[in-house]
Image (cartoon, grey):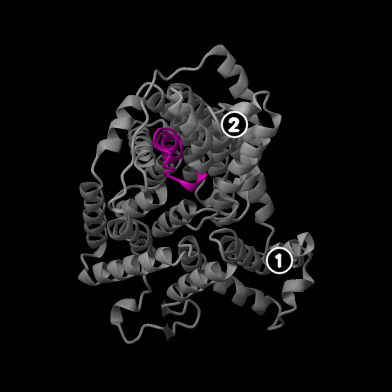
Amino acid sequence: MDIWTQLMGGFATAATPINLLWAFVGCVIGTAVGVLPGIGPAVTVAMLLPITTQVEPTASMIFFAGIYYGAMYGGSTTSILLNTPGETGTMVTALEGFKMAKNGRAGAALATAAIGSFVAGTIATILVTLFAPVVAEFAVRLGPPEYFLLMVLAFTTVSAVLGRSVLRGMTALFIGLAIGLIGLDQITGQVRYTAGVPEFMDGIEVVLVAVGLFAVGETLYNALYEGRARSSINQMTRVHMTRAEWRRSWPAWLRGTALGFPFGTIPAGGSEIPTFLSYATERKLSRHPEEFGTTGAIEGVAGPEAANNSAVTATLVPLLTLGIPTSVTAAILLSALQNYGINAGPQLFQTSSNLVWALIASLYIGNVMLLVLNLPLVGLWVKLLKIPKAPLYAGILIFATVGVYGMRQSAFDLVVMLGVGLLAVLLRRFDFPTAPVIVGMILGPLAEAQMRNALSIGEGRWTVFIDRPMSLTLLAVVVLVLVGPRLWKRFVR
Protein backbone atom coordinates (compact mmCIF):
# COMPACT_ATOMS: atom_id res chain seq x y z
CA MET A 1 0.00 0.00 0.00
CA ASP A 2 2.96 2.30 0.72
CA ILE A 3 4.23 1.85 -2.87
CA TRP A 4 0.75 2.70 -4.19
CA THR A 5 0.62 5.92 -2.11
CA GLN A 6 4.09 6.99 -3.28
CA LEU A 7 3.23 6.20 -6.91
CA MET A 8 0.08 8.34 -6.67
CA GLY A 9 2.24 11.15 -5.27
CA GLY A 10 4.58 10.63 -8.23
CA PHE A 11 1.66 10.92 -10.66
CA ALA A 12 0.56 14.15 -8.94
CA THR A 13 4.05 15.60 -9.56
CA ALA A 14 4.50 14.19 -13.08
CA ALA A 15 1.03 15.34 -14.16
CA THR A 16 1.66 19.04 -13.47
CA PRO A 17 1.48 21.05 -16.73
CA ILE A 18 5.20 21.90 -16.79
CA ASN A 19 6.31 18.28 -16.20
CA LEU A 20 3.81 16.98 -18.77
CA LEU A 21 5.26 19.48 -21.24
CA TRP A 22 8.83 18.28 -20.53
CA ALA A 23 7.71 14.64 -20.90
CA PHE A 24 6.03 15.43 -24.23
CA VAL A 25 9.03 17.37 -25.58
CA GLY A 26 11.36 14.54 -24.48
CA CYS A 27 9.20 11.93 -26.21
CA VAL A 28 9.04 13.99 -29.43
CA ILE A 29 12.80 14.62 -29.49
CA GLY A 30 13.48 10.97 -28.56
CA THR A 31 11.29 9.65 -31.37
CA ALA A 32 12.91 12.03 -33.87
CA VAL A 33 16.37 10.97 -32.66
CA GLY A 34 15.42 7.29 -32.98
CA VAL A 35 14.17 7.85 -36.52
CA LEU A 36 17.32 9.67 -37.69
CA PRO A 37 20.00 7.03 -38.35
CA GLY A 38 23.30 7.39 -36.52
CA ILE A 39 22.00 9.70 -33.75
CA GLY A 40 21.17 7.74 -30.60
CA PRO A 41 19.77 8.82 -27.23
CA ALA A 42 23.29 8.90 -25.72
CA VAL A 43 24.37 11.58 -28.22
CA THR A 44 21.20 13.62 -27.64
CA VAL A 45 21.17 13.45 -23.84
CA ALA A 46 24.91 14.28 -23.78
CA MET A 47 24.30 17.25 -26.08
CA LEU A 48 21.43 18.52 -23.89
CA LEU A 49 23.17 17.95 -20.53
CA PRO A 50 23.98 21.67 -20.11
CA ILE A 51 20.25 22.35 -19.50
CA THR A 52 20.76 20.84 -16.03
CA THR A 53 22.16 24.24 -14.99
CA GLN A 54 18.84 25.93 -15.84
CA VAL A 55 16.04 23.36 -15.29
CA GLU A 56 14.66 21.90 -12.05
CA PRO A 57 15.90 18.28 -11.38
CA THR A 58 12.55 16.44 -11.65
CA ALA A 59 11.62 18.16 -14.93
CA SER A 60 15.02 17.51 -16.54
CA MET A 61 15.10 13.81 -15.51
CA ILE A 62 11.57 13.33 -16.91
CA PHE A 63 12.75 15.07 -20.10
CA PHE A 64 15.90 12.89 -20.44
CA ALA A 65 13.95 9.69 -19.70
CA GLY A 66 11.46 10.66 -22.45
CA ILE A 67 14.36 11.02 -24.91
CA TYR A 68 15.80 7.64 -23.83
CA TYR A 69 12.77 5.42 -24.36
CA GLY A 70 11.38 7.63 -27.15
CA ALA A 71 14.51 6.81 -29.18
CA MET A 72 13.81 3.10 -28.71
CA TYR A 73 10.31 3.56 -30.13
CA GLY A 74 11.56 5.61 -33.09
CA GLY A 75 14.56 3.37 -33.83
CA SER A 76 12.32 0.70 -35.35
CA THR A 77 11.24 3.10 -38.15
CA THR A 78 14.70 3.29 -39.77
CA SER A 79 15.30 -0.42 -39.16
CA ILE A 80 12.11 -1.36 -41.00
CA LEU A 81 12.13 1.21 -43.82
CA LEU A 82 15.88 1.73 -44.37
CA ASN A 83 17.51 -1.41 -42.94
CA THR A 84 19.62 1.07 -40.92
CA PRO A 85 19.27 0.53 -37.15
CA GLY A 86 19.46 3.84 -35.30
CA GLU A 87 20.40 1.95 -32.12
CA THR A 88 22.17 -1.35 -31.47
CA GLY A 89 18.99 -2.61 -29.78
CA THR A 90 17.05 -2.33 -33.06
CA MET A 91 19.54 -4.32 -35.15
CA VAL A 92 17.46 -7.49 -34.87
CA THR A 93 14.26 -5.63 -35.81
CA ALA A 94 15.87 -4.87 -39.18
CA LEU A 95 16.31 -8.59 -39.97
CA GLU A 96 12.59 -9.29 -40.47
CA GLY A 97 11.15 -5.76 -40.49
CA PHE A 98 13.08 -4.71 -43.62
CA LYS A 99 12.00 -7.88 -45.44
CA MET A 100 8.35 -7.24 -44.47
CA ALA A 101 8.68 -3.68 -45.82
CA LYS A 102 10.19 -4.93 -49.11
CA ASN A 103 7.18 -7.19 -49.51
CA GLY A 104 4.66 -4.37 -48.99
CA ARG A 105 3.99 -5.00 -45.27
CA ALA A 106 5.84 -2.00 -43.79
CA GLY A 107 2.65 -0.79 -42.04
CA ALA A 108 2.13 -4.08 -40.17
CA ALA A 109 5.82 -4.16 -39.13
CA LEU A 110 5.68 -0.57 -37.84
CA ALA A 111 2.39 -1.25 -36.01
CA THR A 112 3.62 -4.39 -34.20
CA ALA A 113 6.87 -2.57 -33.28
CA ALA A 114 5.00 0.44 -31.79
CA ILE A 115 2.34 -1.58 -29.94
CA GLY A 116 4.94 -4.12 -28.76
CA SER A 117 7.08 -1.27 -27.41
CA PHE A 118 4.05 0.08 -25.53
CA VAL A 119 3.11 -3.32 -24.03
CA ALA A 120 6.70 -4.12 -23.02
CA GLY A 121 7.36 -0.61 -21.68
CA THR A 122 4.19 -0.66 -19.55
CA ILE A 123 4.81 -4.13 -18.09
CA ALA A 124 8.48 -3.28 -17.41
CA THR A 125 7.44 -0.02 -15.69
CA ILE A 126 5.07 -1.98 -13.43
CA LEU A 127 7.98 -4.30 -12.54
CA VAL A 128 10.24 -1.27 -11.84
CA THR A 129 7.51 0.13 -9.54
CA LEU A 130 7.29 -3.14 -7.61
CA PHE A 131 10.95 -4.18 -7.45
CA ALA A 132 13.00 -0.95 -7.30
CA PRO A 133 11.98 -0.11 -3.68
CA VAL A 134 12.70 -3.72 -2.60
CA VAL A 135 16.18 -3.63 -4.19
CA ALA A 136 16.83 -0.23 -2.56
CA GLU A 137 15.89 -1.59 0.88
CA PHE A 138 18.28 -4.51 0.40
CA ALA A 139 21.06 -2.25 -0.95
CA VAL A 140 20.94 -0.05 2.19
CA ARG A 141 22.48 -3.00 4.10
CA LEU A 142 25.53 -3.14 1.82
CA GLY A 143 28.80 -1.67 3.12
CA PRO A 144 31.83 -0.10 1.38
CA PRO A 145 33.44 -3.50 0.45
CA GLU A 146 30.24 -4.59 -1.34
CA TYR A 147 29.83 -1.23 -3.07
CA PHE A 148 33.42 -1.23 -4.29
CA LEU A 149 33.05 -4.73 -5.74
CA LEU A 150 29.68 -3.83 -7.31
CA MET A 151 31.47 -1.02 -9.15
CA VAL A 152 34.32 -3.37 -10.13
CA LEU A 153 31.63 -5.72 -11.48
CA ALA A 154 30.17 -2.83 -13.49
CA PHE A 155 33.67 -2.02 -14.84
CA THR A 156 34.45 -5.59 -15.87
CA THR A 157 31.06 -6.36 -17.43
CA VAL A 158 30.93 -3.09 -19.37
CA SER A 159 34.48 -3.68 -20.64
CA ALA A 160 34.00 -7.38 -21.40
CA VAL A 161 30.53 -7.23 -22.97
CA LEU A 162 30.73 -4.02 -25.05
CA GLY A 163 33.07 -4.23 -28.02
CA ARG A 164 34.65 -7.24 -29.67
CA SER A 165 37.75 -7.43 -27.48
CA VAL A 166 38.08 -7.53 -23.68
CA LEU A 167 41.51 -5.90 -23.97
CA ARG A 168 40.09 -2.97 -25.97
CA GLY A 169 37.21 -2.64 -23.53
CA MET A 170 39.63 -2.56 -20.58
CA THR A 171 41.83 0.01 -22.37
CA ALA A 172 38.81 2.29 -22.87
CA LEU A 173 37.85 1.79 -19.21
CA PHE A 174 41.33 2.81 -17.98
CA ILE A 175 41.18 5.94 -20.15
CA GLY A 176 37.95 6.85 -18.34
CA LEU A 177 39.42 6.03 -14.92
CA ALA A 178 42.48 8.19 -15.68
CA ILE A 179 40.28 11.15 -16.70
CA GLY A 180 38.22 10.70 -13.51
CA LEU A 181 41.34 10.95 -11.31
CA ILE A 182 42.39 14.38 -12.64
CA GLY A 183 42.02 17.20 -10.09
CA LEU A 184 41.96 17.30 -6.29
CA ASP A 185 42.04 14.06 -4.29
CA GLN A 186 38.65 13.75 -2.53
CA ILE A 187 40.17 12.67 0.79
CA THR A 188 43.66 14.23 1.07
CA GLY A 189 42.99 17.35 -1.05
CA GLN A 190 46.20 16.78 -3.00
CA VAL A 191 46.43 17.90 -6.66
CA ARG A 192 46.72 14.98 -9.11
CA TYR A 193 47.54 14.70 -12.84
CA THR A 194 46.75 18.33 -13.74
CA ALA A 195 50.03 18.85 -15.71
CA GLY A 196 50.19 22.33 -14.20
CA VAL A 197 46.95 23.46 -15.90
CA PRO A 198 44.89 25.46 -13.33
CA GLU A 199 41.59 24.68 -15.13
CA PHE A 200 42.09 20.99 -14.30
CA MET A 201 42.19 21.64 -10.52
CA ASP A 202 38.45 20.93 -10.17
CA GLY A 203 38.65 17.92 -12.48
CA ILE A 204 37.18 17.53 -15.96
CA GLU A 205 33.40 17.95 -16.16
CA VAL A 206 31.49 14.78 -17.05
CA VAL A 207 29.28 16.89 -19.34
CA LEU A 208 32.32 17.93 -21.39
CA VAL A 209 33.48 14.34 -21.84
CA ALA A 210 29.96 13.05 -22.60
CA VAL A 211 29.31 15.74 -25.23
CA GLY A 212 32.79 15.28 -26.72
CA LEU A 213 32.61 11.48 -26.84
CA PHE A 214 29.11 11.15 -28.23
CA ALA A 215 27.88 14.34 -29.93
CA VAL A 216 31.18 15.75 -31.29
CA GLY A 217 32.77 12.32 -31.85
CA GLU A 218 29.71 11.05 -33.76
CA THR A 219 29.60 14.19 -35.93
CA LEU A 220 33.31 14.11 -36.81
CA TYR A 221 33.24 10.35 -37.48
CA ASN A 222 30.27 10.70 -39.85
CA ALA A 223 31.89 13.64 -41.64
CA LEU A 224 35.18 11.77 -42.08
CA TYR A 225 34.03 8.23 -42.86
CA GLU A 226 30.30 7.95 -43.56
CA GLY A 227 29.38 11.24 -45.25
CA ARG A 228 28.74 9.78 -48.70
CA ALA A 229 26.64 6.79 -47.67
CA ARG A 230 23.22 6.79 -49.34
CA SER A 231 20.14 4.74 -48.44
CA SER A 232 16.94 3.98 -50.32
CA ILE A 233 13.67 4.10 -48.37
CA ASN A 234 11.02 1.39 -48.68
CA GLN A 235 7.48 2.45 -49.55
CA MET A 236 5.21 3.24 -46.56
CA THR A 237 1.88 1.42 -46.29
CA ARG A 238 -1.12 1.95 -43.99
CA VAL A 239 -0.12 1.33 -40.36
CA HIS A 240 -2.41 -1.46 -39.20
CA MET A 241 -2.42 -5.21 -38.46
CA THR A 242 -4.83 -7.94 -39.53
CA ARG A 243 -6.51 -10.21 -36.96
CA ALA A 244 -4.05 -13.01 -37.79
CA GLU A 245 -1.10 -10.65 -37.26
CA TRP A 246 -2.52 -9.62 -33.88
CA ARG A 247 -2.77 -13.31 -32.89
CA ARG A 248 0.84 -13.91 -33.91
CA SER A 249 2.17 -10.73 -32.25
CA TRP A 250 0.82 -10.72 -28.69
CA PRO A 251 2.57 -13.93 -27.44
CA ALA A 252 5.84 -12.59 -28.95
CA TRP A 253 5.37 -9.26 -27.09
CA LEU A 254 4.98 -11.09 -23.75
CA ARG A 255 7.92 -13.43 -24.35
CA GLY A 256 10.12 -10.52 -25.45
CA THR A 257 9.20 -8.55 -22.32
CA ALA A 258 10.05 -11.52 -20.08
CA LEU A 259 13.45 -11.92 -21.78
CA GLY A 260 14.37 -8.23 -21.85
CA PHE A 261 13.68 -7.14 -18.28
CA PRO A 262 16.27 -9.32 -16.45
CA PHE A 263 19.03 -8.30 -18.90
CA GLY A 264 18.29 -4.61 -18.37
CA THR A 265 18.84 -4.93 -14.62
CA ILE A 266 22.33 -6.49 -14.74
CA PRO A 267 25.51 -4.43 -15.33
CA ALA A 268 26.16 -4.13 -19.08
CA GLY A 269 23.26 -6.49 -19.80
CA GLY A 270 22.18 -4.11 -22.54
CA SER A 271 19.41 -4.76 -25.04
CA GLU A 272 21.48 -6.55 -27.69
CA ILE A 273 21.57 -9.98 -26.01
CA PRO A 274 17.82 -10.23 -25.17
CA THR A 275 16.81 -9.04 -28.67
CA PHE A 276 18.90 -11.77 -30.30
CA LEU A 277 17.56 -14.33 -27.79
CA SER A 278 14.00 -13.21 -28.49
CA TYR A 279 14.56 -13.51 -32.26
CA ALA A 280 15.98 -17.03 -31.86
CA THR A 281 13.05 -18.00 -29.58
CA GLU A 282 10.42 -16.69 -32.02
CA ARG A 283 12.08 -18.44 -34.92
CA LYS A 284 12.04 -21.72 -33.03
CA LEU A 285 8.42 -21.40 -31.82
CA SER A 286 6.89 -19.94 -35.00
CA ARG A 287 4.30 -21.86 -37.01
CA HIS A 288 5.53 -20.01 -40.10
CA PRO A 289 9.30 -20.68 -40.11
CA GLU A 290 9.39 -20.33 -43.90
CA GLU A 291 8.74 -16.56 -43.56
CA PHE A 292 11.93 -15.94 -41.54
CA GLY A 293 14.63 -14.55 -43.81
CA THR A 294 12.40 -14.58 -46.89
CA THR A 295 9.18 -12.50 -46.84
CA GLY A 296 9.62 -11.42 -43.20
CA ALA A 297 7.92 -12.90 -40.12
CA ILE A 298 5.95 -10.52 -37.89
CA GLU A 299 7.03 -12.41 -34.74
CA GLY A 300 10.63 -11.58 -35.65
CA VAL A 301 9.75 -7.88 -35.28
CA ALA A 302 7.31 -8.11 -32.33
CA GLY A 303 9.52 -10.14 -29.96
CA PRO A 304 12.84 -8.26 -30.34
CA GLU A 305 11.13 -4.84 -30.15
CA ALA A 306 9.40 -5.83 -26.90
CA ALA A 307 12.69 -7.24 -25.51
CA ASN A 308 14.49 -4.01 -26.44
CA ASN A 309 12.01 -1.69 -24.72
CA SER A 310 11.67 -3.93 -21.67
CA ALA A 311 15.47 -3.96 -21.21
CA VAL A 312 15.70 -0.16 -21.61
CA THR A 313 13.06 0.45 -18.91
CA ALA A 314 14.73 -2.09 -16.60
CA THR A 315 18.01 -0.10 -16.63
CA LEU A 316 16.33 2.26 -14.15
CA VAL A 317 16.39 -0.42 -11.42
CA PRO A 318 20.21 -0.59 -10.94
CA LEU A 319 20.60 3.11 -11.84
CA LEU A 320 18.23 4.38 -9.13
CA THR A 321 18.81 1.72 -6.47
CA LEU A 322 22.58 1.09 -6.73
CA GLY A 323 23.83 4.10 -8.70
CA ILE A 324 25.20 1.72 -11.35
CA PRO A 325 24.48 2.45 -15.04
CA THR A 326 23.95 -0.60 -17.26
CA SER A 327 24.01 1.31 -20.57
CA VAL A 328 25.73 4.35 -22.08
CA THR A 329 22.62 6.53 -21.84
CA ALA A 330 22.06 5.43 -18.22
CA ALA A 331 25.64 6.54 -17.47
CA ILE A 332 24.89 9.99 -18.88
CA LEU A 333 21.63 10.13 -16.86
CA LEU A 334 23.74 9.36 -13.78
CA SER A 335 26.01 12.31 -14.60
CA ALA A 336 22.89 14.52 -14.95
CA LEU A 337 21.87 13.55 -11.39
CA GLN A 338 25.40 14.30 -10.17
CA ASN A 339 25.18 17.77 -11.73
CA TYR A 340 22.37 18.47 -9.27
CA GLY A 341 24.40 17.08 -6.37
CA ILE A 342 22.07 14.05 -6.17
CA ASN A 343 23.76 10.70 -5.55
CA ALA A 344 21.90 7.77 -7.09
CA GLY A 345 21.84 4.73 -4.83
CA PRO A 346 19.82 3.09 -2.05
CA GLN A 347 19.43 6.38 -0.14
CA LEU A 348 17.85 8.05 -3.18
CA PHE A 349 14.41 6.61 -2.31
CA GLN A 350 14.63 8.42 1.06
CA THR A 351 16.49 11.62 0.14
CA SER A 352 14.81 12.34 -3.21
CA SER A 353 11.66 10.22 -3.14
CA ASN A 354 9.59 12.88 -4.95
CA LEU A 355 12.00 12.86 -7.91
CA VAL A 356 12.17 9.03 -8.06
CA TRP A 357 8.42 8.45 -7.97
CA ALA A 358 7.70 11.32 -10.39
CA LEU A 359 10.22 9.75 -12.79
CA ILE A 360 8.58 6.30 -12.48
CA ALA A 361 5.10 7.83 -12.95
CA SER A 362 6.36 9.69 -16.04
CA LEU A 363 7.25 6.33 -17.62
CA TYR A 364 3.55 5.34 -17.61
CA ILE A 365 2.56 8.72 -19.06
CA GLY A 366 5.39 8.65 -21.61
CA ASN A 367 4.41 5.19 -22.89
CA VAL A 368 0.90 6.44 -23.71
CA MET A 369 2.32 9.60 -25.35
CA LEU A 370 4.71 7.54 -27.48
CA LEU A 371 1.96 5.20 -28.67
CA VAL A 372 -0.06 8.24 -29.79
CA LEU A 373 3.00 9.82 -31.41
CA ASN A 374 4.16 6.68 -33.21
CA LEU A 375 1.06 5.07 -34.69
CA PRO A 376 -0.90 7.98 -36.27
CA LEU A 377 2.13 10.20 -36.99
CA VAL A 378 4.55 7.65 -38.44
CA GLY A 379 4.28 9.29 -41.89
CA LEU A 380 5.51 12.55 -40.37
CA TRP A 381 8.55 10.86 -38.79
CA VAL A 382 9.45 9.24 -42.10
CA LYS A 383 9.84 12.74 -43.62
CA LEU A 384 12.73 13.34 -41.17
CA LEU A 385 14.72 10.75 -43.13
CA LYS A 386 14.89 13.25 -46.02
CA ILE A 387 16.99 15.76 -44.01
CA PRO A 388 20.48 15.94 -45.61
CA LYS A 389 23.26 14.69 -43.35
CA ALA A 390 25.53 17.73 -43.75
CA PRO A 391 23.21 20.36 -42.19
CA LEU A 392 21.94 17.81 -39.64
CA TYR A 393 25.40 17.07 -38.20
CA ALA A 394 26.49 20.69 -38.50
CA GLY A 395 23.47 21.62 -36.36
CA ILE A 396 24.44 19.01 -33.74
CA LEU A 397 27.99 20.41 -33.59
CA ILE A 398 26.73 24.00 -33.18
CA PHE A 399 24.21 22.96 -30.51
CA ALA A 400 26.87 21.01 -28.56
CA THR A 401 29.32 23.94 -28.73
CA VAL A 402 26.77 26.53 -27.57
CA GLY A 403 25.59 24.23 -24.75
CA VAL A 404 29.08 23.55 -23.39
CA TYR A 405 30.19 27.18 -23.68
CA GLY A 406 27.01 28.32 -21.91
CA MET A 407 27.88 26.27 -18.79
CA ARG A 408 30.90 28.32 -17.67
CA GLN A 409 31.58 30.73 -20.58
CA SER A 410 35.00 29.08 -20.89
CA ALA A 411 36.87 28.75 -24.19
CA PHE A 412 39.12 26.17 -22.48
CA ASP A 413 36.07 23.88 -22.09
CA LEU A 414 35.55 24.00 -25.87
CA VAL A 415 39.19 22.96 -26.46
CA VAL A 416 38.76 20.00 -24.05
CA MET A 417 35.46 19.06 -25.74
CA LEU A 418 37.07 19.05 -29.19
CA GLY A 419 40.05 17.05 -27.89
CA VAL A 420 37.71 14.43 -26.42
CA GLY A 421 35.80 14.41 -29.74
CA LEU A 422 39.01 13.59 -31.63
CA LEU A 423 39.77 10.85 -29.08
CA ALA A 424 36.26 9.44 -29.74
CA VAL A 425 36.96 9.33 -33.49
CA LEU A 426 40.20 7.40 -32.87
CA LEU A 427 38.47 4.98 -30.48
CA ARG A 428 35.67 4.30 -32.96
CA ARG A 429 38.01 4.04 -35.94
CA PHE A 430 40.07 1.34 -34.22
CA ASP A 431 37.00 -0.43 -32.78
CA PHE A 432 37.42 0.58 -29.12
CA PRO A 433 34.06 0.89 -27.29
CA THR A 434 33.31 4.39 -25.93
CA ALA A 435 30.87 3.32 -23.17
CA PRO A 436 33.62 2.13 -20.74
CA VAL A 437 35.26 5.59 -20.93
CA ILE A 438 32.21 7.39 -19.53
CA VAL A 439 31.43 4.60 -17.01
CA GLY A 440 35.05 4.65 -15.76
CA MET A 441 35.03 8.43 -15.44
CA ILE A 442 31.75 8.57 -13.46
CA LEU A 443 32.20 5.51 -11.25
CA GLY A 444 36.02 5.68 -10.88
CA PRO A 445 36.16 8.37 -8.14
CA LEU A 446 33.21 6.72 -6.32
CA ALA A 447 34.92 3.32 -6.47
CA GLU A 448 38.15 4.86 -5.12
CA ALA A 449 36.29 6.41 -2.17
CA GLN A 450 34.50 3.12 -1.37
CA MET A 451 37.79 1.16 -1.59
CA ARG A 452 39.46 3.53 0.87
CA ASN A 453 36.48 3.32 3.24
CA ALA A 454 36.56 -0.48 3.04
CA LEU A 455 40.27 -0.56 3.85
CA SER A 456 39.66 1.78 6.79
CA ILE A 457 37.02 -0.66 8.11
CA GLY A 458 39.49 -3.55 7.65
CA GLU A 459 42.29 -1.55 9.30
CA GLY A 460 44.36 -1.68 6.11
CA ARG A 461 43.77 -5.40 5.47
CA TRP A 462 42.80 -6.34 1.87
CA THR A 463 41.13 -9.48 3.29
CA VAL A 464 38.16 -7.24 4.16
CA PHE A 465 36.90 -8.02 0.62
CA ILE A 466 36.75 -11.77 1.27
CA ASP A 467 35.70 -11.72 4.95
CA ARG A 468 32.06 -10.80 4.19
CA PRO A 469 29.84 -13.32 2.29
CA MET A 470 28.28 -10.75 -0.08
CA SER A 471 31.60 -9.16 -1.07
CA LEU A 472 33.16 -12.61 -1.57
CA THR A 473 30.25 -13.58 -3.86
CA LEU A 474 30.65 -10.39 -5.91
CA LEU A 475 34.42 -11.01 -6.19
CA ALA A 476 33.70 -14.52 -7.51
CA VAL A 477 31.26 -13.08 -10.10
CA VAL A 478 33.91 -10.54 -11.25
CA VAL A 479 36.46 -13.35 -11.76
CA LEU A 480 33.83 -15.42 -13.59
CA VAL A 481 33.01 -12.55 -15.96
CA LEU A 482 36.69 -12.14 -16.87
CA VAL A 483 37.71 -15.80 -17.01
CA GLY A 484 34.40 -17.55 -17.81
CA PRO A 485 34.16 -16.78 -21.56
CA ARG A 486 37.73 -18.02 -22.21
CA LEU A 487 37.19 -21.23 -20.23
CA TRP A 488 33.92 -21.81 -22.10
CA LYS A 489 35.68 -21.38 -25.50
CA ARG A 490 38.34 -23.90 -24.50
CA PHE A 491 35.65 -26.30 -23.28
CA VAL A 492 33.78 -26.00 -26.60
CA ARG A 493 37.01 -26.62 -28.57
- Give the residue at mark 2: 292
Q: Residue at x 32, y 31 (%)?
A: 382
Q: Secondary structure at mark 1?
A: helix
Task: Report the number of numbered marks.
Answer: 2
* Label 2: few (<14), some (14–19) or many (≥20) C-alpha neighbours in 10 Å: many
Residue 401 seen by the camera = yes
Q: Is residue 43 above or below residue 457?
A: above
Q: Residue at x 54, y 52 (%)?
A: 319
Placement of the C terminus among the 4 image quadrants: bottom right
Which percent across, then down, holds residue 214? 37, 58
Q: Which three-letter amino acid code belongs to the residue tagged 1?
A: Arg
Placement of the N terminus among the 4 image quadrants: top right
- Give the residue at mark 1: 486
Question: Which residues fall within the magenta stretch?
Answer: 70-89
Main SS, magenta residues: helix
Residue 5 seen by the camera = no
Which percent across, then down, holds residue 241? 50, 17
The furthest residue to the bottom: 196
Q: Which three-letter amino acid code belongs to the residue tagged 2?
A: Phe
Which percent across, then down, holds residue 340? 40, 56
Mark toward the start of the polypeptide (1 vs 2): 2
Which percent across, then down, holds residue 132? 61, 44
| Among the 4 quarters of the image, the one containing residue 65 | top left
* Label 1: few (<14), some (14–19) or many (≥20) C-alpha neighbours in 10 Å: few
Real-space Cα separation, disc 1 to disc 2, in angstroms: 32 Å
Q: Secondary structure at mark 2?
A: loop
Q: Residue at x 46, y 39 (%)?
A: 72
Q: Nearer the viewer, residue 83 or 130?
A: 83
| Among the 4 quarters of the image, the one containing residue 380 | top left
Q: Is residue 20 above or below residue 351?
A: above
